[in-house]
Amino acid sequence: MHTEVHVHGSVLVLEGASQQELEQALTPWLSYVDIDSLSDAKSAQQDEPGIVFDRRRRMLEICWTGWVGRNFQKALETAFEALCPYTEEACGIEVTYYHDDGRDEHGMVFVGPSLEAVQDMQRKFMVEDVSAL
């Protein structure tokens, strides 16, 4: 059984980080969906760019939708953990699963240059969520 998932966010990467290094870090995700490189990381939704590295802005832009199975979350978390050493600052990446029964499951995966930076970003998101209530 496959589930539609949407992954969305922007990751500021370190100056000098190459597309090859980012692809290597994202290998668990790319391999899971049978993709060899970022140039092949197209979204199932035609109006979404997929996974794109903008070298000039040092930004890894993620707006990707695909069909995945139950082990996708682990592959995604492993990929983002490997991406952490290439990040300039911490950020949250939205992950939304669209289940067949109509339920949407929304979550966040955080990446950052250090555990402290990631925890600070998690706290920031939590404060924003509580404030919105």
Image (cartoon, helix red, strand yellow):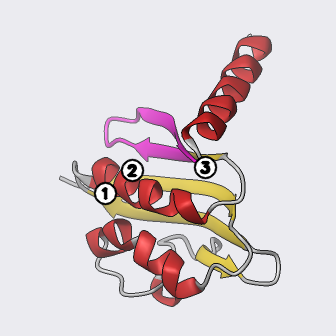
Which kind of residue does numbered mark 1 sit on? Ala
Picture coordinates of residue 7, whole percent (x, y): 53, 55
Picture coordinates of residue 5, whole percent (x, y): 43, 53
Is disc 1 in contact with disc 3, using a CB cutoff of under 8 Å? no
Which residue is disc 3 drawn over?
112
Q: Secondary structure at mark 2?
A: helix
Which residue is disc 1 drawn over?
75
Q: Mark 3 or mark 2, which is nearer to you?
A: 3
Which kind of residue does numbered mark 3 sit on? Gly
Q: Secondary structure at mark 3?
A: loop
Direction from residue 14 to residue 51 in the image, left or right: left
Picture coordinates of residue 69, whole percent (x, y): 23, 54
Is disc 1 in contact with disc 2, using a CB cutoff of under 8 Å? yes
Q: Residue at x 47, y 79 (%)?
A: 23
Q: Residue at x 65, y 70 (%)?
A: 60
Q: Is any atom of residue 88 visible in this view?
A: yes
Q: Is any atom of residue 42 visible in this view?
A: no
Q: Secondary structure at mark 1?
A: helix
Can you say which quadrant of the picture contains the C terminus? top right
Q: Which residues are magenta?
A: 94-111
Which kind of residue does numbered mark 2 sit on? Glu
Which residue is disc 2 drawn over?
77
